[in-house]
Amino acid sequence: MLFVKEATGAEILFRSLSQFGVECVFGCDHVRHMLDESSLDRLQIRYYQLKHEQAAVHAADGYARATGKPGVVLLTTAAGVTNGVTGAATAFSDSVPLVIIAGPLLSNQYTNTALRELDISGVMMPVTKYSTKINPVTDTGFYSSLKAALTIAADGRPGPVLVELTNETAPYQVKELPKNSRYTKTIASKPIIEKSMESAKQYIEKAAKPVLFIGGGVIAAEAAEDLREIAKKAHIPVVSSLLGVGSMDAGNPLFLGMLGMHGTFAANKAVHQCDLLISIGVRFSDRVTGKISGFSPKSKKIHVDVDPAEINKIIPVDLPIVSDAKDFLSILKTMLDYPKIRANSESWTNEAVEWKRTVPRFTTSNSILSPQTVIHLLNEYADKDTIVVTDVGQHQIWTAHYYDFTQPRTLLTSGGLGTMGYGLPAAIGAAGAFPGKPVICVSGDGSFQMNLQELVTAVKYRLPIKIVILNNGYLGMVRQWQELFYQKRYSEVKVCSPNFALLANAYGAKGFSAGTEEEARQIMKEAFDCNGPVVMEFDVEEEENVYPMVPPNSNNHQTILPR
């Protein structure tokens, strides 16, 4: 008699993922005890086992941002699901495609009362765009449900999708689970699109002071090359949000830098004085707009976004266009009269570019080793297409300003939620996406300690992550606010930290420290010659501030510049 082993939920899941072209999966379980020893190798799936579920979701997020493909993560315990909520919320805020597979992968796992009683879809509903519940062993629709989840995550406005696994056989599939409003992709009719495109063409060709404002939607739609072509031919100045950094080459004179609270002088002044603001793939967060009533007061506004809910939500616009950024830009570039645009706006463009030159981004510092210098030095040792991941804080803004990003998907950072602890696990995800390719993780002494346990994950898989810790002894951004707006009444901002170089050695990584520019150059050279993970700790000035800065409840042109 021939006995055929029944496939487990884990085997069915990984087999299906492999057929859909998934290359990486992240989680905290040791999946090899659920699968045959050679299954993962045969299926050509790289599985990365992290130490904490929040970090596992961030790693899938980093993979998704680096590649543009949905990141896949497994959460198989009740506490694991609740730990993963922060990662899901981070991805949801920044429109990152994830497939979160939550629930038991083994039949006996469902005896866990906590997992059985937890309302997984209810917990995840606010931070996912769609969810489905299915039994991978008994349900014939599992394959199609998983395929739909991968499609929905990346379709329209990207975001996290929940696939809840169950061992139940009840007819739960009959009842459709709640969908987030982002689930339905809005497609305007052809006559409306044609009319909108013609209107956009007229606005742009008549403008005397146009500015292109680009966000993460341009990168998500793979539209950076179309954007660069239009900017070059039309000679229009470009500004970006934090998540739009990389859409334009930082060295392009037309790129004025980042807009908003910590935006450059040139970017903020250009948007304040322009007569046409062409906003593509942005959501007008408070960190971009400053005081809403004073945001770009002289301009007509075009807003292009794939999600109609974002249009006219915060900033009233004159021409709303519901469209994918790639579709919009690829059509627009064929319609514009470029000589006419340049004739109308050439003097304005020359003036705006001059602001960038006369008020440089790089500022002097009184410290022995300034954080700006450290980021500036990274340009000398890293390749131009190196992926740079940051945590959240002052180091995040310094990196956005002083590192020369030339390509999209090379800056990975938490923008909307501002998740401290994002950097290291997201760097693991980016390194997993491109095996052997160096990845830089820039962090602070506060942020790094929120997920530093994942250093052992980087060591385990020998990932070439170069970790840069700017150690100023403070939660720097909070301290800066207390200094500037609360008369230096510091409260709960001093950070106690270990010796990060020695900690790296304890984990099995290389560790270096520096306190001067000469030492910084020396350890960077050594670090970038190493193959595995390296931690570089830089002791920088404690009370160094991020500039420029727009005070709260102020207009963006009311910028505080370094003294």
Image (cartoon, rainbow, N blue to C red):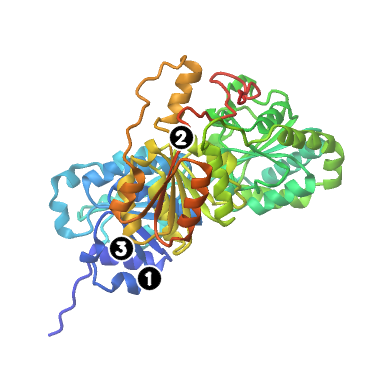
Q: Amino acid at mark 2?
A: Gly
Q: Which residue is mark 1?
A: 44
Residue with the mark numbered 2: 393
Whether residues under marks 2 and 1 lie with C-beta atoms below 8 angstroms apart, the answer is no
Residue sitting at x 36%, y 59%: 25
Q: Quadrant of residue 208?
A: top right
**Where 13 falls versus 216 (above or below)?**
below
For the residues carrying marks 3 and 1, which lies nearer the camera in this image? Answer: 1
What amino acid type should be assigned to the residue bearing mark 1?
Gln
Distance Cα–Cα, label 3 vs label 1: 14 Å
Q: Is residue 260 in view from this perspective?
A: yes
Report the residue at 54% width, 29% height from top.
287
Report helix, strand or loop for mark 3: helix
Residue 274, placed above or below residue 250: above
Query: Of discs 2 and 1, which sits in the foreground?
Result: 2
* Left or right of 86 on screen, residue 526: right
Mark 3 touches mark 1? (CB < 8 Å): no
Number of on-image labels: 3
- Spot the residue most to the bottom: 1
Q: Is residue 391 above or below residue 388?
A: above
Pointer 3: residues within 10 angstroms few (<14), some, or many (20+)? some
- For label 1, count other residues whose C-alpha is less than 10 Å away and answer few (under 14), some (14-19) or many (20+): some
- Distance (Cα) linking label 2 and label 1: 37 Å
Work out whether mark 2 precedes mark 1 in sequence or the reverse, and give the earlier one.
1
Give residue 61's position: percent from left, percent from top: 42, 50
Q: Which residue is mark 3?
A: 13
